[in-house]
Image: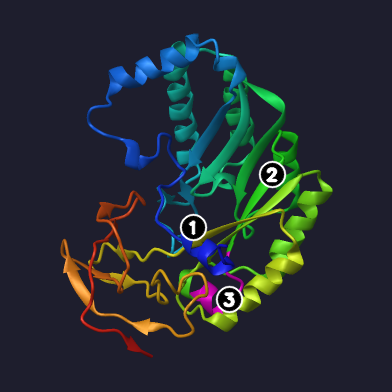
Amino acid sequence: MTSFSQLLQSFDVPGPRYTSYPTADRFVEAFGEAQYLQALDLRRHSVRAHAYPLSVYVHIPFCESLCYYCACNKIITGKYARAVQYLKSLRTEVGLLLPHLGTGHAVSQLHFGGGTPTFLRDPELIELMDILGKAFQWKADGEYSVEVDPRTVNAERLATLRQLGFNRLSLGVQDFDPQVQIAVHREQSVQQVQTLMEAGRSLGFKSVNLDLIYGLPKQTTESWKRTLTTVVKLRPERIALYAYAPICLRGSNRSATLIPMTCLSPHRKPRCCPKPFKYCSQKAMSTLAWTTLHCQTILSPSPSGRDAYTATFKAIPPSLTAI
């Protein structure tokens, strides 16, 4: 019989991000434009197409400030005009897609992710839903969700989202410990989250999701227990739990902003290490990156709108020294 610890470890493996489909690890050079258009046409003319509704993901990459744990496709900006231009591009994208996919396909799941989807103001959100509404048919029993930053949204904005048809909220919490929040540049109170959850439920959102990350800098066993105790009291309908992946952000001044982390050894992740560790550093593409034993990272550009990179590579340092 599988123990609870074994069950946790069985799921504690790397996986592709949900922000594209097919997921990034399925893209190969042999699958090009012709193969993509063929797949769309097959879907359009398949007799099974109407029996299997679509799921739609819309990525809104804009954020007002940078969270240090984030490795998603993002643009840090306060220029809201960029969102208007982005909507024009989305409209063009939908226009290119529909001649091959066809219009009127049923959709049972919609998710707005980011970035921060609520970076868009009400007029842009209304316009975006209008674009999608003309292309697809929403199923009455579908799940339509949007990611929300508790620091930038109030009950009035939630009411707009509900009127647009969203019925699920995903709140980015990550951790409730003040020291952890300072370390990852994501400060928000329990009261902010609780107030939004209560407002969402009163407006008719049938599901409220909390996003959490384990292995963050300054996170300890005791602090993580306190966060989980608070989460239990808030009683979310769903929890999205992710492992922290270390990143190194290189600013335009060429100085590295290093984001340390707690031990992410596979056999310790589910329980969270009781002590943080110091790490050795190595050079990668002229960018100072930090890694730990069993920590796997990937070297790739970070489309954050700045001179920044996600410096990642496989490495095993000669030693780890407990602080």
User: Circle 2 is placed at which residue position?
Assistant: 168
Task: Give the residues drawn in magenta, as a range.
Answer: 174-182
Q: Quadrant of the C terminus?
A: bottom left
Q: What element carries label 2?
A: strand
The residue that mark 3 highlights is 224
Tell me the CA gap for discs 1 and 3: 19 Å
Viewer-nearest of labels 2 and 1? 1
Label 3 element class: helix
Instruction: From the top left corner, tell me how far across and down residue 246 is, in percent.
Output: 36, 66
Can you tell which quarter of the image residue 293 is in? bottom left
Observer-side mark, 2 or 3, equals: 3
Q: Of marks 2 and 1, which one's residue comes earlier in the chain?
A: 1
Residues marked 2 and 1 touching at CB (< 8 Å): no
Question: 189 or 207, which is in the foreground?
Answer: 207
Distance from label 2 to label 1 (Cα)? 24 Å
Q: Of residues 171 and 21, which is closer to you in this image?
A: 21
Three-letter code, disc 1: Phe
